[in-house]
Amino acid sequence: MHPVDTASSSIAIDNPALSVKNLSFYYGSQKAVEGISMDIHQEQVTAIIGPSGCGKSTFLKALNRISELETKVRVDGTIEFFGQNIYSPRVNLNRLRRKIGMVFQKPNPFPMSIYDNVAYGVRVFGRPPRASLDEVVEAALRGAALWDEVKDNLGKSALGLSGGQQQRLCIARALAVKPKVLLMDEPCSALDPIATMKIEELIDTLRQELTIVIVTHNMQQASRVSNYTAFFSTDESRIGQLVEFGPTSQIFMQPAELRTRDYVEGRFG
């Protein structure tokens, strides 16, 4: 796998995929994160770590506005996707979520065939000819390192796959619509060590073409797969705050904040 301190290119630094500026996020009247500012660099893996309840998943869902499907929310500050504020009223949410895909903690394949799972989003956004769709499905399954395992069973139910295969299928479904960013909310938490290793190897491959943001409770996983790490926490006066953000090697080896050091060394959380 790539070393954790892989340097960003000047393009990735100068033109981040996502730029978060003074973001505060509310579920109704309840504040979940406060004053978050950070850039998410292109074709890099950014890990979000921190104790339970610190707003990691909330922050992740804010990046493609998927939380609005769950409940009423309010946002202060901005999130820019290649310079466009995604909370502008002019934003097309379906198009946004096509460009910023998401994979959830628990695999959620649809109760349909493997083929139709991957093709689902492509069909929603258009009606490609069957030959073209076949190519898209194969490319997405290859991209998710699943093709060789399922190519002879594309018509079978996705629900018959193992947990690890289901998660890679969900990744293939996201890849099929050609996103620029892939959000991953603890994608390995329900998987065994072998399936986890395959997902981590897949992340290492996908970073060559995609910007990836991953929420994880696993410190070893964050150090293995990410180029950058953001540590979120809470204290008595503030909830859901960004304590420290930087190259992963710095966060784990030479953190600037005592709270970061205590967390990565396992003293709390």
Image: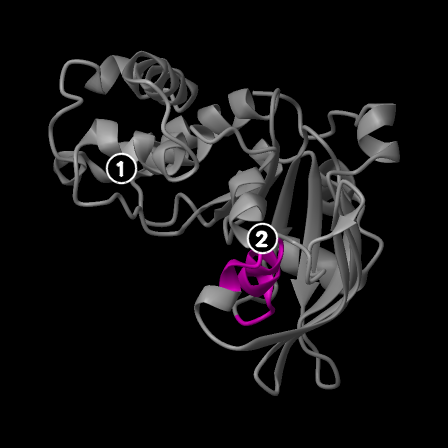
Instruction: Determine whether, in the image, residue 102 is placed left or right of residue 138.
Output: right
Classify 6 as above or below 261: above
Compare marks 1 and 2 and give the one earlier in the sequence. 2
Residues in magenta, as a range: 53-67
For residue 231, which quarter of the picture? bottom right
Which quadrant of the rendered structure holds the N terminus?
top right
Tell me the SS state at disc 1.
helix
* Residue 159 vs residue 214, the one in the foreground: 159
Q: How is the image coloured?
A: one colour
| Residue picked out by circle 2 | 64
Classify 217 as above or below 42: below
Residue at screen point 15% across, 14% down: 152
Tell me the SS state at disc 2.
loop
Image location of residue 175, percent across then percent down: 45, 30
Image location of residue 128, percent across then percent down: 37, 23
- Name the mark on residue 133: none
Tell me whether the residue at label 1 lies in contact with that at label 2, contact meaning CB atoms closer than 8 angstroms. Answer: no
Amino acid at dot 1? Gln
| Residue picked out by circle 1 | 166
Viewer can see residue 47: yes
Image location of residue 174, percent across then percent down: 43, 36
227 in the magenta segment: no
Which quadrant of the rendered structure holds the C terminus?
bottom right
59 in the magenta segment: yes
Instruction: Determine whether, in the image, residue 197 is placed left or right of residue 87.
Output: left
Mark pair 1, 2: CA separation? 22 Å
* Residue 215 vs residue 156, the one in the foreground: 156
Amino acid at dot 2? Asn
